[in-house]
Amino acid sequence: MTFTSFFDSCRRNTRVRKVLIGGAAASLLGIGALAAHAEPGSLMRAHMGGQHRGHGFAGDPAEMTDHMLLRIDHMLAKVGASDDQKTSIKAIAKSAITDLAPLRKQQWELRKQMRDALTAATIDKAKLAELHTQQTQLFDKTSARMQEAMIAAAEILTPEQRKAMAERMGRRGMRGMGPQS
């Protein structure tokens, strides 16, 4: 089956389309968790058109958490989430942010070690390979926790809300996610 024929069959198959839309909605919910463990300053740079214009709240985890919860609340209001749904999903997001914080610190330490290894007088390929393995394992842990949070949050929303979220996401577009139809 070719890539094009796969997507043609998805357009015709309502069940597959619903699964894909639900997955897209769950992915959108994960953006908050992703930003919570992203590189310090990256969230602020994203709001500034990709340019670094200061550290903003990047160094303050509480401020960053509050900002992410505000964005999640705004997004949920747009799809008609109830107060109970908002409370539950924000609790899931807070838990994920808390769980991801130590992994974020580990990511920074690995990045520093990678930079040091790459700028050393002699390149130690074995050391770089080991650092890469550690980064991959850490990414897998982070990804698994984010996936868990996204699924839990998506299960709280109704299918109609997930569909509305996916449609909203499609209208706004997702930078770096390919063409929008």
Image (cartoon, helix red, strand yellow):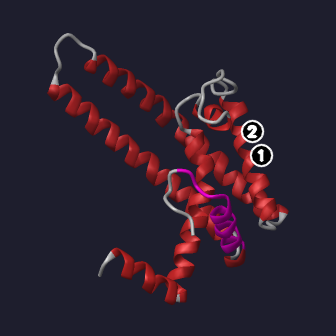
Please tell me how many numbered marks the rendered image carries.
2
As displayed, is residue 99 above or below residue 166? above
As displayed, is residue 121 above or below residue 113? above
In the depicted view, which residue is nearer to us: 55 or 138?
Answer: 55
Question: Which of the 4 image quarters holds residue 58?
Answer: top right
**Is residue 118 shown in magenta?**
no
Q: Secondary structure at mark 2?
A: helix
Q: Main secondary structure of the magenta part?
A: helix
Q: Residue at x 41, y 47 (%)?
A: 141
In the depicted view, which residue is nearer to us: 134 or 160?
Answer: 160
- Dot 1 amino acid type: Leu
Determine which residue is flagged by label 2. Answer: 66
Where residue 118 sits: x, y (%)? Answer: 26, 20
Q: Which residues are magenta?
A: 161-175
Query: Is residue 12 left or right of 125 when viewed as pictured?
Result: right
- Dot 2 amino acid type: Asp
Where residue 62 sits: x, y (%)? Answer: 70, 32
Q: CA distance from mark 2 to mark 1?
A: 6 Å
Determine which residue is flagged by label 1. Answer: 70
Residues at circles 2 and 1 in contact by the CB criterion of under 8 Å: yes
Q: Secondary structure at mark 1?
A: helix
Question: Which quadrant of the rendered structure holds the C terminus?
Answer: bottom right
Q: Residue at x 53, y 81 (%)?
A: 17
Q: Residue at x 65, y 30 (%)?
A: 61
Query: Is residue 37 left or right of 62 when viewed as pictured?
Result: left
Query: Is residue 105 left or right of 137 when viewed as pictured?
Result: right
Question: Which quadrant of the rendered structure holds the N terminus?
Answer: bottom left
Question: Which of the 4 image quarters holds residue 180?
Answer: bottom right
In the depicted view, which residue is nearer to us: 99 or 138?
Answer: 138
**Is residue 172 shown in magenta?**
yes
